[in-house]
Each structure stands twice: as structure tokens, then as C-alpha cells.
């Protein structure tokens, strides 16, 4: 039976089902991964814009390129259903804003864990439950980045629910006012040695711990939040391509 949100079932995988999914927020990124890096690709579903593609790496290993949508609530639905169709390993490929001056736009961040400020995660496990990536998959991503000579950083990510208020954006927001506890939050996170902002990893990591699957996250840095609020569009494609290449190289070799 096809699952309601992702639009496909375990039977759609055929005789060589994938164990790993590369999960992107954007359907366009999922399509790009499938069309650029995979062979013998088939579209499984594009229901609700949650495009999913089944394809094969050059080694013959099957791989799912799937879409989570924006934010943790959407991701939580997709991941739940991916686990139900047999996925046991998930690498989130996303974009993020740097909190540290040393983490430059165009580089990538590999999250070893997350400060998780996400309501969806609280429905899955208590606030105190650790949001940590799988250590072996995380090291594999870092090793891939090193081999590919891609500038990368490994550390703690701040996973928050909102793009504007939650990441202390006021100049580019329709709402110029912040709750007092959010004013100065970026500087506070900088002092805590948190590397970046993004919006899904914390919930993914908590789900992995509770559900019993393997999860990791690699994000291309597209904004330098220690300097400005804006996305640096001229460097976005490079940052995303680097994150994808690291994930693909890891998927090929990880067992």
C-alpha cells in the first residue's frame, strides 16, 4: 500500500531496495541529485511536492533521493514514512547560515549534534533527549569531504523552527520586533561554539534515536550570519554542490 504523504510503498523499490535516503528540503535538489549522480532513475512520487526518486550509484547500490519539505513538522512526517518502507540510513542535505566568522559561505557544515529548539521534536522525545547524529556516518561524511578537498566544519548545529524570528532576522523580516529572549541569540550561540543555523537536523536526530535508524546531516553554508541576514546567492550553488558530492561519496562507501 502506498503511504499517504510520500506516495509510494516498499513494493515500488523492486528487487534491490535502498537502505539509504538522501533527504533534501527542496524538490528541485532531490531531482538534481537523481538526474546528476544516479543511474536508471525512476520517479516514485511527486505528491505534495515531496518528490522521490529511486536510482543507482555506479557501484550498483540503490539509493533514494527524497524531499522533506521545509521545516521539522514536514520532515517528521516524511521520515516516519521512509522508515516504514524500510529506509535505515538518512543523510540530510541542506543549506544553513553560519554563526561563526570562521565558517565561510561556500563551505559545508557536518552536524555532530544539534541544539534542538523544535516543537516537532518535542512530540517525539523530551526536550532533554539528546539530538545527536550517528558518529560513524558523521565521520564518514567528514572523511569524504577531506578526500574531496572540500572545506568543511564538524560541530554543533542550532536547529530552529523559524527562518526569520528564530534566527534573529529583523531587517529582512516583515516583523521587525523580537521577543526579548531572542534578541542577541546569534551572539550567544557564537559564544557556545555553535556553528550554524538550520531547520531540520535536530528533529531528524531525535527521530533516529527513538526510531532506531542511522542519521547524519551535511549543509552548504549560504549565509554569514555574523555579518548579515541575507543569503549569498552567488555562492549558493557551489555550497549545495559540495554538500551533495560529500553525501554521494559517503553513500557509495558506507555500509
Image (spheres, grey):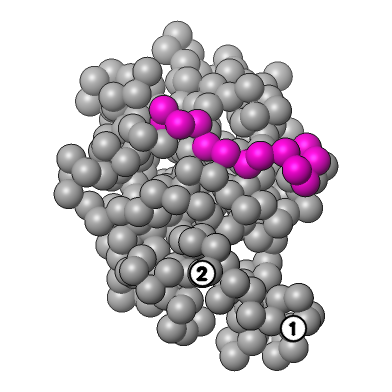
Q: Can residue 25 be seen in this view?
A: yes
Instruction: Tell me what residue is drawn at x 48 percent, y 76 percent.
Output: 225
Give the prevailing secondary structure in the magenta stretch. loop
Magenta stretch encompasses residue 135? yes
Q: In this view, does 199 lie to the left or right of 226?
A: right
Kind of element beneath mark 2: helix
> Between disc 2 and disc 1, whose residue precedes?
1
Instruction: Report x, y in % for residue 61.
Output: 33, 19
Viewer-nearest of labels 2 and 1?
2
Mark sitting on residue 190: 2
* Span highlighted in magenta in the image: 125-137
Mark sitting on residue 209: none
| Residue highlighted by disc 1 | 178
Kind of element beneath mark 1: loop
Instruction: Report x, y in % for residue 149.
Output: 17, 49
As measured in the structure, the alpha-carbon distance from the residue carrying label 2 to the one carrying label 1 is: 19 Å
Amino acid at each position: 500500500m502506498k503511504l499517504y504523504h510520500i506516495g509510494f510503498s516498499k513494493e515500488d523499490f523492486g528487487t534491490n531496495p535502498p537502505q539509504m535516503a538522501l533527504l533534501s528540503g527542496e524538490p528541485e535538489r532531490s531531482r538534481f541529485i537523481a538526474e546528476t549522480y544516479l543511474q536508471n532513475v525512476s520517479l516514485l512520487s511527486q505528491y505534495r511536492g515531496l518528490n522521490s526518486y529511486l536510482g543507482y550509484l555506479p557501484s550498483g547500490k540503490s539509493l533514494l533521493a527524497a524531499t522533506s519539505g521545509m521545516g521539522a513538522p514536514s520532515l517528521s512526517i516524511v521520515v516516519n514514512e521512509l522508515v516504514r518502507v524500510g529506509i535505515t540510513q538518512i543523510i540530510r542535505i541542506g543549506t544553513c547560515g553560519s554563526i561563526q566568522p570562521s565558517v565561510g559561505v561556500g563551505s559545508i557544515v557536518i552536524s555532530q549534534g544539534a541544539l534542538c529548539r523544535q516543537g516537532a521534536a518535542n512530540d517525539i522525545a523530551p526536550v532533554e533527549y539528546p539530538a545527536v547524529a550517528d558518529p560513524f556516518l558523521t565521520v564518514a561524511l567528514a572523511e569524504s569531504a577531506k578526500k574531496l578537498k572540500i572545506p568543511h566544519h564538524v560541530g554543533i548545529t542550532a536547529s530552529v523552527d523559524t527562518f526569520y524570528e528564530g534566527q534573529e532576522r529583523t531587517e529582512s523580516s516583515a516583523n521587525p520586533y523580537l521577543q526579548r529572549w531572542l534578541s542577541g541569540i546569534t551572539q550567544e550561540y557564537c559564544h557556545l561554539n555553535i556553528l550554524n543555523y538550520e531547520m531540520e537536523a535536530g528533529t531528524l536526530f531525535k527521530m533516529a534515536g527513538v526510531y532506531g535508524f542511522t542519521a547524519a546531516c551535511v549543509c552548504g553554508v549560504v549565509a554569514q550570519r555574523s555579518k548579515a541576514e541575507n543569503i549569498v546567492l552567488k555562492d549558493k550553488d557551489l555550497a549545495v554542490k559540495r554538500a551533495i558530492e560529500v553525501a554521494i561519496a559517503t553513500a557509495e562507501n558506507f555500509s
